[in-house]
Image (spheres, rainbow, N blue to C red):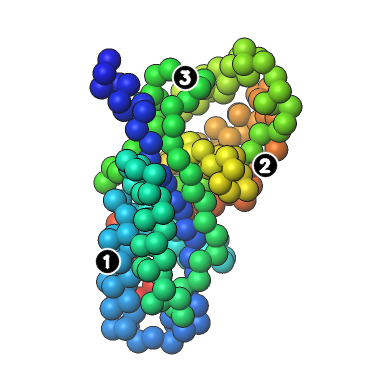
Amino acid sequence: MTTDTTEQSLRTFNHYALFSFKDAYWSLGADERADFHENWLTALRAATQKVDLFQGTEHDVDLIVWSALTVNDNRDTAVFFEKFTKALTPYRHLIEQKDSLWGFTRPSQYSKARSKQEIDPFSDEHRTYLVIYPFSKTTEWYLMSRDARQGMMNEHIRIGKQYEDISQLLLYSFGLQNQEFVVVYETDDLTRFSDLVNELRDTEARRYTLRDTPLHTAIYHPAEETLALWK
């Protein structure tokens, strides 16, 4: 019981940065690009506990950088942003940060046990596709009774468990960014994920969704292989 409690109380910080390559990048020779890839990746890895790179699928996003760390001290987040800034500064003429989404994990108020489908940010294994988006509930949601919200979330959880091959990570960003949550999914089958989202549209809780866009879909490769796509 002590171990479970400790695991539930640990918080992780997760940061998703969306980047595109500038024109100056494309003017570099192949060797210069390779040097940039190696140096930038080294700097990113030095900035955090775990970093993964994903190939973007949108016209204005080339890649997504996922940084994760365990929060042991109030200064840990500030230290991350300082190191992350230093990792970007020498290369801002080559890359542009288009957006960022970030937040903290915490135990769910609607489920006592940790879900077997929860993503481990520090795992070296990833499913093929990553989907992330900002999420906010309406004021009416928070003014309802706890029991009323629990009932609707039970339906939501029941449907999610039917898609055991889809993993999820929920981040809390109340008062920290414009959204209240960052929702993260990993899947090997985009059509099945789309089916899950479609099914969740029929739930009662959907009435109380204020915002769940823009969505960002990306493809996982090991970091060096991701960067090698743009040699």
Residue 129: where, in percent of width, then height?
A: 43, 47
Q: Quadrant of the image for the N terminus?
A: top left
Task: Compare marks 3 and 2 and give the one earlier in the sequence.
Answer: 3
Q: What element carries label 2?
A: strand
Q: What element carries label 1?
A: helix
Question: Looking at the picture, does residue 189 appear above or below residue 160?
Answer: below
Along the line of sight, the residue nearer the viewer: 225 or 136? 136
Label for residue 72?
none
Q: Residue 92 occupies which quadrant of the picture? A: bottom left
Label for residue 211?
2
User: Quick check: can you spot residue 127?
Assistant: no
Question: Looking at the picture, does residue 1 appear above or below residue 202?
Answer: above
Q: Quadrant of the image for the C terminus?
A: bottom left
Please name the amino acid that badge 1 sits on: Thr
- Residue displayed at 28% across by 73% down: 39
Determine which residue is flagged by label 1. Answer: 42
Label 3–label 1 contact, CB within 8 A? no
Determine which residue is flagged by label 3. Answer: 111
Please name the amino acid that badge 2 sits on: Arg
The residue carrying pointer 1 sits among few (fewer than 14), some (14 to 19) or many (20 or more) residues within 10 Å by Cα, namely few
